[in-house]
């Protein structure tokens, strides 16, 4: 394989960026898994009102560092289990202890 071909492959992998989402942890009871709720606001095309859409993703949390209420960044990854296709990238803001 020539150096040109390897450079082209590296450039192709850099172009395929993984999706990143920001959300709030709603459950961290499972081992190495947390459930992240991602909220999205958009304007309804017909009624012109704002709609709040919430989706919940199971994310792989290797070190169990995320707690309930934390703001986190998750990134798309290969399938880890039946439901897990996301990985915890970082904890952006820790929740206040009550």
Image (tube, rainbow, N blue to C red):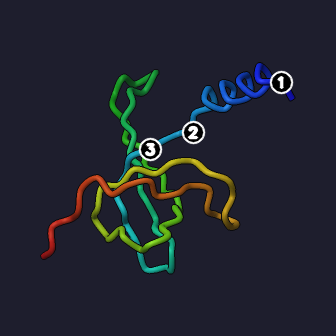
Q: Position of residue 25 (x, y in %)?
A: 36, 63
Q: Is residue 18 left or right of residue 91?
A: right
Kindly identify which residue carries mark 2: 18
Q: Please, is residue 8 above or below residue 85 in the view?
A: above
Query: Tag 1, which secondary structure?
Result: loop
Q: Which of marks 1 and 2 precedes in the sequence?
A: 1
Q: CA distance from mark 2 to mark 1?
A: 27 Å
Q: Position of residue 51 (x, y in %)?
A: 37, 37
* Residue closest to the eye, 92 or 58: 92
Q: Which of marks 3 and 1 precedes in the sequence?
A: 1
Determine the image quadrant of residue 27.
bottom left
Kindly identify which residue carries mark 1: 2
Kindly identify which residue carries mark 3: 21
Answer few, some or many: residues within 10 Å of disc 2's Cα (few below 14, many 20 plus, some between 14 and 19): few
Q: Position of residue 65 (x, y in %)?
A: 36, 70
Answer few, some or many: residues within 10 Å of disc 1's Cα (few below 14, many 20 plus, some between 14 and 19): few
Q: Please, is residue 96 above or below residue 72 in the view?
A: below
Answer few, some or many: residues within 10 Å of disc 3's Cα (few below 14, many 20 plus, some between 14 and 19): some
């Amino acid at each position: 394989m020539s150096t040109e071909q390897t450079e082209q492959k590296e450039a192709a992998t850099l172009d395929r960026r993984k999706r990143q989402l920001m959300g709030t942890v709603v459950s961290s009871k499972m081992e190495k898994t947390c459930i992240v709720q991602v909220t999205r606001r958009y304007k309804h095309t017909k009624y012109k009102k704002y709609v709040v859409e919430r989706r919940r993703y199971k994310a792989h949390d290797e070190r169990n560092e995320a707690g309930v209420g934390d703001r986190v960044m998750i990134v798309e990854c290969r399938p880890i289990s039946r439901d897990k296709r996301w990985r915890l990238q970082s904890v952006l803001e820790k929740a206040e202890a009550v």
